[in-house]
Structures are given as C-alpha cells and as structure tokens.
Amino acid sequence: MGLKFLLSYLCSIASLCLQAQTITGKLVDGKTGQSIPLGNLALAAQDLSSQIKYALSDTAGIFEFRETPHGKYVLSASCIGYKNIQKEILLNENGTNILNLGTILMTEDISLLKEVTVKGERPNFEIRNGQVKIGVAGNPFFKADASLLDVFRKLLGLQINPDGTMLLASRATPTLFVDGKPVNMNRDEIRVYLSSLSPDMIESVEQINQPSSKYDGEYQGIIDVKLKRNQALGLRGSYNIRFQRNLYSLLDNTLALTFKTNSFVYDLNLGQTTGSTFYKYHALQYLSDSNAMTTDTRTITFNRNLNIQARVGYQILKGHNLEAYVRTYQIGRNAVTGNQLITQTYDFAKTVSAITSENNALPKQHNYSGGLNYDVSFKNSELHVATALAQIDNRQTEDIQNRKVPGNQLTDYWKTIARNNVMIRAAQADYTQNIKRGKLEFGGKFAYTTTRNNLRYDTLSNDVFIPDPRRSNLFRYQERIAAAYFSYSGHRDKFNYSLSITTEQTSNLANSITDAAVTEKKYLKWLPSLNFTNEIENSHQLAFTYSRRLTRPTFEALNPFRFYLSPRNYWIGNPYLQPSTTELFSLSYTIRNFHASLNAGREKDPMVRYPEYDPVTNILAYLGTNLPYRNFANIQASMPLTVRKWWRVNNNIGLYFNRELRPYLG
C-alpha cells in the first residue's frame, strides 16, 4: 500500500522535473573556412559569476556540452592566434534535446601568439542532486597531469593507494563506470586502463558518493568517466609510458587507437606491465604465556601482464547505436615470500623459538569478457540495453617450506595446486521518459554468477607427498540477483530534488563439498534514496542526501577454507555471513569555488575478520563474522586557488571518525 501511494505521489508531481540539454557547435576560421582544433570553450552563468563547464574542440573543430540544465548562459571561445568571442545562449524547457549552434566563425588576432585564456579561472565542477561533476578536458587544474589516474589523485574525498585501489571518504571502494556503464575490471585492469587515458580524452568525471536507487544496491560509490566524443573522421591514437622506481621498478606501456568512419567507430587499447613490486608486513603480538611473537613478511612479485580491449560502435540510424566489445587480461606472476616468526620473552631478552618460511608461488589469471550494448534516443525518451558475459580463470601453484632456526631443520613442506573459475552473466535495461517538464527513469537487472574452487594441499610425510584433507578444499557457489528500480527528479523554484527506490531479490547457494555442507540463503531488500538541493543563488547552494545501500558477502568471505598468511596465521571464510546494509546521510554546502560536506551513517551487520588466538599452538586465525554495527562520520572541504597565472593549487582537507564493536577471542 505504501509503495502504491509513493508511486502515485511521484507521478502526480512529475511535471515539475528539470530536463537537461546538449549544446554543440563547430569552430571555424572565418578567413579560410578550416576547422579549428583544440579551441578552449567555457560555459558560464549569464552574470559570469562562475564557470559551469569547460570543453575543447576536437580535430574537426566540433565541441559539445552534455547534460546542461535549462537557463541563460554565456559561451566563451578562445584559441591562440584568434580573438576571443562570446555568445549568449538560452536553454528553455520547451527546446529540443540538442541545441546546435552551427558554425562559429573566429577571426584572426593581429597580435598573434599572445596567450589567450578564458577569464574567471575557477575549477570546473558542478554539484547537482548529490553528485559532483568535474570537467577534465580544458580544465587548467589538470593540464600538468599525464593520465586520468593522476587526475583521480586530485579529486576531493577520493584516495588512490600505491597499488591502485581506490577509497572514498566513507572508506568504501567505488565502482568504476565509463559512459554510465560499469566496466567490471579488476584492480590491475583499472590501473592500466586509467593510465592509458590522457586528460584531453575525458569530458568529465562524475563522483557519486551516495548512488541513488537506480544503481545496484551493492555500489557503495561510483566514479563515472565520461569520454570525450571526437567527431573527426580517420585515425587517431596515443601512447603512454609510466615508470616507477622504488626498491624495485615497474613499467606500464599503454597504446590507444581509434578509427572513425561515418557509421563505425573502432577502438583498440593495448597495455603491458612488466617489473616487480615489493610488499612488507611487520607485526608484534603478545601471547597469553607472556611471550611476544614478531611476524616479519616480505614478498617480491615479478609481473608480466597483458591487457587488450577492443570495441566496435555502429550507428544504425540517427539516435540508434549498437556497440560490441571484447576484453582480455592475462596475468603472469612469480611471488617469492620470506617469512620469520620469532617468539621471545616479554622483555625481548631471550629468544624462545624461531621459524622461517619460504613460499614460491606462481599465480596466473586469464580474464575474458564481452558484451553488447544497444542505445536508442527518441525525441522525449531513451532506452539503454546492456548484456555482458565474463569468465575469470585463476590458477596457482605454491611451494611452502617451514624451518626451525637455528639448525635449519625442516618442519613442514607443502605443495599446493589451486584453480578457481568464475562465470558472470548479466543483462540490464534502463528507460528514461521526459513528461512535459518531467523526467522519469525505471529499469531492471538480472545477474547470475557461478564459482568453482578446487584447492589441493600435498604434505611431505616420510619423504613422500600425500594429500592433506585438512587444508584441501572443494567449494561451489551460485548467486542470482534480480533488481528493479524507479527514479524521479524534479525542480521547483530554487529547489531541486530526486527520489528513487530499488528492490533486490538475492538467492545464493554455497556448497562446501569437502565438509559436506550446503548453505542456501534468500533475502529481499528495499533500498530508497532521496536528495534535496536549495539553489540559494548563482554558485551558492545547500544540499541534503539520504541513501540506503547493500553489501553482499563475496565468494572468498563465504568459502570455509584456510588461506594461510604465514605458518601460524590464516583467515577462513564463513558460509553463514549475512549481507550488511548502510544508511548514509550527507549535508553539503557550496559557494563559488568552496565546497564542504558533512557525512554520517551506520552500517548494520558489517562483515569483518576478527582474530582468534590458540595459546597451545600459537596460531592466530582470522574468522569472518558480522559485527552488530559500525558508526562513521567525516567532514571534508575543498577550495582551489589560483595564486599566479602559472600557479594553481587545489586544497583539500578531511576529518574522519569510525567506531565499531570488535570481539577478540583467545
């Protein structure tokens, strides 16, 4: 009854929605009639109080500003050797989805070669409905960056770790999207892909800290990369090289090629990673017998990885586009680990025991994925259909030896052979309808994932390797997810607002063949979200956002098997883990180029690994469990400054709070 009332209410006020439009045009030399590439364009509010968007003209002189709200603007265009021009633009609610300005003639500047810049050098960012949109191409703050990965390091509330992993201010890992679609890449693939994109290839980056209910409930945050559309025909490409030198060296090579005809677009991206990485772990643990145990682990990983992505886009008719893509990522590594476990008296005056461990691992991964996307644009509506298929095949062999020190006596000798295969099948459809001045979105998604895990341990006994049933594991996992969403956004006077709701039905089956245990779970979740924004005046706004998100346990977290970190440390999965839900509130304030936000929330049933210590064997096991709750909050602020014409500074500050109840058993 409540849902019917909500749907009825939303439909009754749909006429209040705000519709965005696309502005396009072409820069042309007024004397020769030739196209002008790399022209700087800026779209500002009519009173010139703030820059709204930036853009660069492509090699055909064509530029584009997408998703521009209704209103009055001033378009500024500049290019070295030409006079600056300005043009007033009006976007009204009764206009078409695309406003074509046609040909814009630029006249030669007799002073020539004097540097021409757009006035009002402010960072190109826009905040609407709780989303931060940052323009990249043509943005002076990103001119010195070599790749999109460098741009990400400057974004407020986004942390890029040395291994390429990303964290939001809420400590959640965001999902990478490209042009509104998830890319489904692993951490290494994402790092290589972001390194292959130069800033001038990116129109904008949308940072969605609180995804609305139109997105999968498991997405705790989203980074959506909007690629710049080049309308020029022919071949273009770029090559990037990235070299890291610390204790060891790592080299990334990426090549991106695009060939465009009147109806087809062909993209090819090649990436190769060679070199080594180094990992060090050091821990001190006080035992129940008053002794102290020191763990020192060092791992050198030699890499030889290859990444290939290919895409073909075909324009069937105007507004009808079909896209097919394939992708493969081949990982070949050799990880050599040395570990020391030293047990000493409480005052470290005497060594009780010492064990060294050597692990020579050869992990390999073969990833293959592909998909079909179909997009249709009508006068007042859009339809997007996406299908994807992915297979991930992991194989690994290990040679593990544990020895006592001194004497170098062999205590344990294991050999492992592991194979893990994951198959993902997904289909999604999204529909958008503009009703008078309103915008309505709804859609659905289905995903089916199967995982097979086979890990065999052989232990040396009497000079013969025999199977070890305590450590070997055979595990199967199936997961089905069906979801549907409804979303509505609107505008009235100086208020913008959006409301959405998602329902997700999840069913999974975990089968531990080794333990002869089968666990089946089914659950239904309702995930609402809302946003209210008050446009106090131009470049001055206050916004409030609420959302509820879902985190499902992963295959690794459910697998009841020991994964050894060292001879006496391991973690083990729990097939009875429950999904967690997070409720997040956000209040943000923006005035001109200053932005501040306050975020707070609670996660119910968060999934963690807690330590359990065995005083007899000195083994520390990390067990998966659901904690009662986790409370968190953070305050962030950002204010870019232009100190000199050649000196721009982006200032970010953040304060973080986290509280949770963790048991310690032992």
Image (cartoon, rainbow, N blue to C red):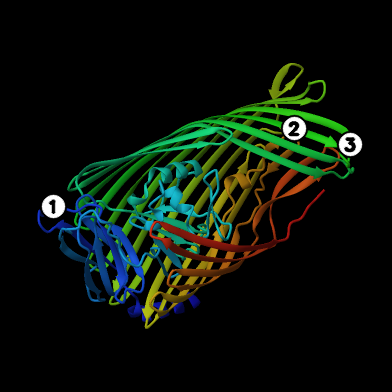
- How far separated are the C-alphas under marks 3 and 2? 18 Å
Residue closest to the eye, 238 or 492: 238
Amino acid at circle 3: Ala
Amino acid at circle 1: Gln
- Image position, residue 41 (x, y; %): 27, 61
- Image position, residue 81 (x, y; %): 20, 55
- How far separated are the C-alphas under marks 3 and 1? 82 Å
Amino acid at circle 2: Gln
Q: Residue at x 69, y 62 (%)?
A: 659
- Graded by Cα atoms within 10 Å as few (under 14), some (14 to 19) or many (20 or more), the crowding at tag 3 reads few
- Can see residue 1? no
- Graded by Cα atoms within 10 Å as few (under 14), some (14 to 19) or many (20 or more), the crowding at tag 1 reads few
Give the mark nearer the N terminus: 1 vs 2: 1
Q: Are marks 1 and 2 in contact (CB under 8 Å)?
A: no
Question: Is disc 2 placed on a helix, strand or loop?
Answer: strand
Residue position marked by numbered label 1 in the rendering: 34
Q: Residue at x 34, y 80 (%)?
A: 16
View extreme (front): residue:
111
Residue position marked by numbered label 3 in the rendering: 349
- In this rendering, is residue 95 above or below 254? below
Residue position marked by numbered label 2 in the rendering: 340
Question: Is disc 3 placed on a helix, strand or loop?
Answer: loop
